[in-house]
């Protein structure tokens, strides 16, 4: 705790003692459930939400109050100075107070929800993202805009696959295109970038993910959004995303060697069952068929499994044929 925190605590204690000042309380909004799905937008936050009162003079909530106050003060300074910080920066600002990165992440989401503003308006970002843009970003009169002759955008689940496509000069060989990766579960910046590209270019967007429940869920986050960020769905989701691969049916059609396939775990089966029950999949019968095929076969596979057919199979055969002949769902 630094001297500013000491002064704040002393001031609160003095006001309470001398003027019978009531201890400050903050009300924090939380997302409880998402009970509305809009096919044009994605998951929408319900009008109902929970509100938690966090008191500064209650032993059970004083730490939480201090954490919220600290993050609000950081956000205030960032907005006032027109500067930005990562969630990691905020955590390291006072690791003893926050205890874990998850605490910081949760409070920042709650503050966004409470103030009804997107997280970028708080001047808080996650991490940098990787993307390859055919033509580039242009700046005119202080405004940055995107100009590209790309024919499509491809979202890549894993950074390793992204780097492989770059090494093989995939974009130049096949067609002008944009490839982007959020390195697994995408952060807000990755989703904002995909949405910005879609709003600007209006070209097809494909997803290349592992043929497993985790990869499917990542693709759904880009397309339909997430519960945690449902209050910002209108600026983060891209309902036009199409599943290019790796499809469970691809594994059978291409006769991927059995030693490259991985048995589904109980956790995988549970995740798959949960995905099939989600409201947005009612409008995606082809996706459901693919997931039901995975359930029946009880196996999953990573994109890298295609190298067991041939080292360059992914970039020279699989993707070119899929994109030329319409092998997506």
Image: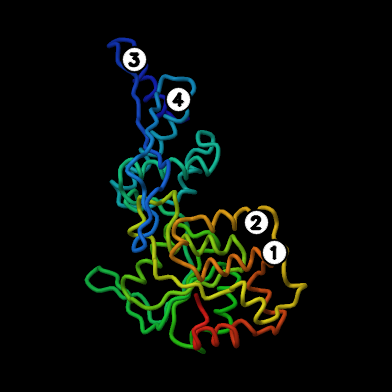
Who comes first in sequence, dot 2 or dot 3?
3
- Secondary structure under badge 1? loop
Report how far apart the C-alphas of labels 1 and 4 lie in the structure.
49 Å
Mark identifier at residue 82 = none
Mark 3 and mark 4 residues within 8 Å of each other at the beta carbon: no
Residue annotated with mark 4: 62
Residue 187: percent from left, percent from top: 47, 57
Report how far apart the C-alphas of labels 2 and 4 lie in the structure.
41 Å
Quadrant of residue 112 within the rendered picture: top left
Mark identifier at residue 14 = 3
Tell me which residue sits at (68%, 74%) in the image: 305
Q: Nearer the viewer, mark 3 or mark 4?
A: 4
Horizontally, residue 327 falls left or right of residue 300, namely left
Who comes first in sequence, dot 2 or dot 4?
4
Report how far apart the C-alphas of labels 2 and 1 lie in the structure.
8 Å
Q: Residues within 10 Å of mark 1 (few under 14, many from 20)?
A: some
Q: Nearer the viewer, mark 2 or mark 3?
A: 2
Residue 228: percent from left, percent from top: 44, 48
Mark identifier at residue 298 = 1
Residue annotated with mark 2: 269
Report how far apart the C-alphas of labels 2 and 3 lie in the structure.
58 Å
Report how far apart the C-alphas of labels 3 and 1 lie in the structure.
65 Å
- Secondary structure under badge 2? helix
């Amino acid at each position: 705790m630094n001297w500013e925190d000491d002064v704040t605590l002393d001031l609160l204690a003095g006001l309470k003692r001398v003027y019978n000042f009531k201890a400050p309380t903050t009300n924090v909004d939380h997302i409880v459930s998402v009970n509305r799905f809009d096919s044009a937008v994605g998951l929408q936050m319900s009008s109902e939400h929970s509100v938690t009162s966090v008191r500064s003079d209650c032993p059970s909530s004083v730490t939480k109050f201090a954490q919220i106050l600290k993050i609000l003060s950081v956000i205030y300074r960032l907005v006032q100075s027109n500067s930005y910080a990562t969630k990691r920066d905020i955590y390291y600002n006072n690791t003893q107070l926050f205890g874990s990165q998850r605490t910081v992440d949760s409070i920042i989401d709650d503050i966004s929800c409470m103030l009804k503003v997107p997280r970028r308006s708080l001047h808080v970002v996650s991490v940098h993202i990787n993307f390859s843009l055919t033509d580039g970003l242009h700046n005119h009169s202080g405004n940055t805009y995107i100009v590209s002759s790309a024919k499509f955008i491809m979202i890549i689940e894993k950074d390793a696959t992204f780097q492989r496509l770059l090494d093989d000069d995939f974009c130049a060989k096949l067609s002008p295109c944009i490839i982007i990766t959020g390195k697994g579960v995408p952060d807000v910046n990755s989703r904002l970038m995909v949405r910005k590209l879609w709003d600007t270019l209006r070209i097809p967007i494909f997803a290349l993910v592992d043929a497993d429940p985790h990869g499917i869920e990542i693709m759904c986050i880009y397309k339909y959004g997430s519960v945690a960020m449902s209050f910002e769905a209108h600026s983060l989701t891209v309902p036009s995303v199409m599943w290019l691969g790796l499809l469970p049916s691809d594994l059978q059609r291409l006769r991927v060697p059995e030693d490259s396939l991985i048995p589904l775990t109980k956790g995988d089966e549970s995740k798959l069952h949960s995905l099939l029950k989600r409201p947005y999949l009612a409008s995606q019968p082809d996706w459901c068929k693919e997931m039901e095929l995975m359930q029946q076969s009880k196996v999953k596979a990573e994109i890298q499994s295609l190298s067991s057919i041939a080292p360059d199979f992914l970039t020279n055969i699989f993707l070119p044929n899929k994109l030329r002949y319409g092998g997506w769902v």
